[in-house]
Amino acid sequence: MFSAMQLARDGAEHHLAALGLAELATLESALCEVPGNRPGTRLHASPALSALLGQHAAIGLLASRQLGPQSRPVRALLFNKTVGQNWSLAWHQDRTIAVRRRIDTPGFANWTVKSGIHHVEPPFALLERMVTIRIHLDEAGADNAPLLIAPGSHRLGRIPEHAIAEAVRRLGTRACLARRGDAWLYATPILHASEPARTPASRRVLHVDFSADPLPNGLEWL
């Protein structure tokens, strides 16, 4: 039987019932206008959502315990899998951040625009100081596409694409099962993947990146 995962050692830890029924209802109300027919939606400019992610709210508190008082949410996405949108995602590291506008800056590369939002790859050391929290609005059981991670991969630095499969084979994989209201806390650079659900059902997850670092050269977090 697997032991419980730890953030420092494995790059992930499970927080049971991180949100109560009232907090879940508030979160769902904040997300009620987000289209439900997309695999993933980038979120911004949502005061109601920002209040739920603040330092002293249940979600933000998980991050500030790791990052300190300067911790703040810097990117949010809503993922959903359904019978009609039963997608998959290959093994990868998250390597981009979202910023307010493009300012070419040494060490920041591969600029893209996604859903009208500027994204860029920062120096990898910045990503290594970040954490990601995934809040489950639905159950993610073994048959409903739980996130898969390679434990310990957050300690390997930037992993070249050609080396990812070997790293996953060597480290093994763990499925991050969750009930509604649970949260998973991850080291942002951890290798992760998502398979299609074997028994498709709604599987909504709010994915939020947190950082305590300022950005240089006038760059601003979104």
Image (cartoon, rainbow, N blue to C red):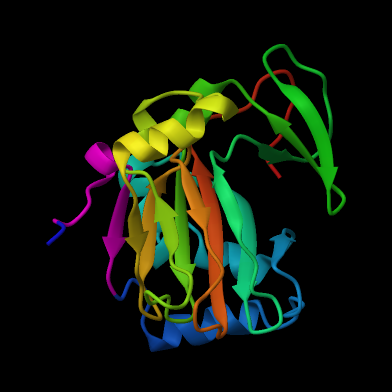
Left or right: where does residue 146 sit relative to residue 98? left
Left or right: where does residue 127 sit relative to residue 55? right
Q: In the image shown, does 151 or 121 lie closer to the viewer?
A: 151
- Residue 179 visible within the image: yes
Where the N terminus falls, by quadrant?
A: bottom left
> Which range is magenta?
3-16
The number of numbered discs placed on residues in the rendered structure image is 0
Q: In the image shown, does 8 or 198 lie closer to the viewer?
A: 198
User: In percent of the image, x 45 and y 30: which residue is there?
Assistant: 128
User: In percent of the image, x 53 and y 82: which residue is there?
Assistant: 26
Where the C terminus falls, by quadrant?
A: top right
User: In percent of the image, x 64 and y 60: which residue is there?
Assistant: 77
* In the depicted structure, whether residue 3 falls above or below residue 46: above
**Percent coordinates x, y for residue 184 in the rendering:** 37, 60
* In the depicted structure, whether residue 106 falls above or below residue 222: above
**Percent coordinates x, y for residue 50 in the rendering:** 60, 62
The image quarter in which residue 82 lies: bottom right
- Residue 129 visible within the image: no
**Percent coordinates x, y for residue 84 in the rendering:** 71, 82
The image quarter in which residue 44 lies: bottom right
* In the depicted structure, whether residue 70 falls above or below residue 18: above
Q: Is residue 5 magenta?
A: yes
**Percent coordinates x, y for residue 149 in the rendering:** 40, 50
Q: Is residue 134 magenta?
A: no
